[in-house]
Amino acid sequence: MKLLVYGAGVTGSLFAARMHEAGHDVSLLARGERLAALRRHDVRLAEEDSPDIKRVGVPVVEHPAGGYDLIAVFVRAQQIDAVLKSLADVEGDVLFLFNWAAGAEPLGAVIGHERVLLGFPTDGGTMDGDVVRYRATSHLTRLVAMPIGEPDGGITPRLDRIVRALRSAGINAKAKPRMDAWLKTHAAFEVPLGQAVAAAGGPVALAGDPDAVRGMLRLMRRNLGALSTPPVPRGFAALRTLPEGLLVAVLRRFLRGPTAVHSGLSDTSPAAAAELARLAEQIRA
């Protein structure tokens, strides 16, 4: 597979390295200081706090060129407008792997509706200088598959082909019949969660304020109730039906746990705040 990975942050770098090591023809697109670091040291990976750093020589580019079998996009929601313009005349199916609640229509309007696939990355970690420190695969990535799907919810030959290619590289991908609904459900949950964590100063601090957690839960319920389709996965419906007191207790326990503490919830950067704001706009729309 000839693959362009657009975005060289944590998830894009991990994805590119794994596909490259599996023998695919991969180019990793980066800009600015990240591009310079990749040209000096390749992709540098380390598992969580391990001192062992692995270098993977993924070819890096500054601009897309020619055509690809697949373009995988790993950017924040507020960055997508520039990405779409740069891909409008580049051949290849485009798999968008990021937070997005506006559906496929605005994506396809720029690059062509027939090219769009939707997904969400499940790998996670942090940037330590120019080293990607990723979570151990024994946790989230083994239990939760990377969902990808067609905008219309169908299971197509190209979707099956992409899933097989990702799985051959050790990426736990899975075809998702209702990917658009999955992304909207995720945003309905994530926006109140991320904004409440930011306002409290971190997930542990939020866990210590039951009134703030209760307000966050009520926003989640309002968002989920406004969805035009049932939530995906169906388990999210429990946020609307279970007793409020029970859910507040469960959410406070989650916020104190390692998944919340070591996840992107601890990211207080302006970029993370801007992404939550963009998602909130999409939910309101």
Image: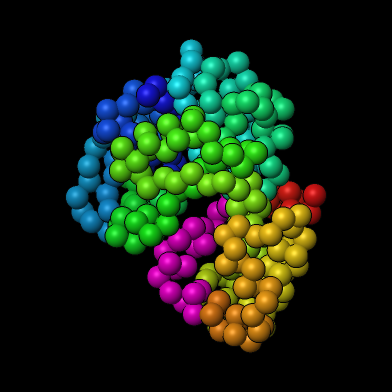
Would residue 194 be seen by someone viewing this image from the given angle? Answer: no
**Residue lying furthest right:** 285
Would residue 242 be seen by someone viewing this image from the given angle? Answer: yes
Q: Is residue 267 magenta?
A: yes
Vertical comparison of 69 with 161: above or below: above
Q: Main secondary structure of the magenta part?
A: helix
Q: Is residue 95 left or right of residue 26?
A: right
Q: Which residue sits at x=66%, y=27%?
A: 113
Q: Which residue sits at x=19%, y=50%?
A: 52
Q: Which residue sits at x=49%, y=34%?
A: 159
Vertical comparison of 143 with 168: above or below: below
Q: How is the image coloured?
A: rainbow
Across and down, in percent, residue 173 comes to 42, 45
**In terms of image quadrants, where is residue 118?**
top right
Range drawn in magenta: 253-272
Q: Is residue 175 magenta?
A: no
Q: Is residue 73 left or right of residue 26?
A: right
Across and down, in percent, residue 148 comes to 51, 43
The quadrant the N terminus occupies is top left
Across and down, in percent, residue 184 comes to 66, 52
**In terms of image quadrants, where is residue 258?**
bottom left
Q: Which residue sits at x=65%, y=60%?
A: 231
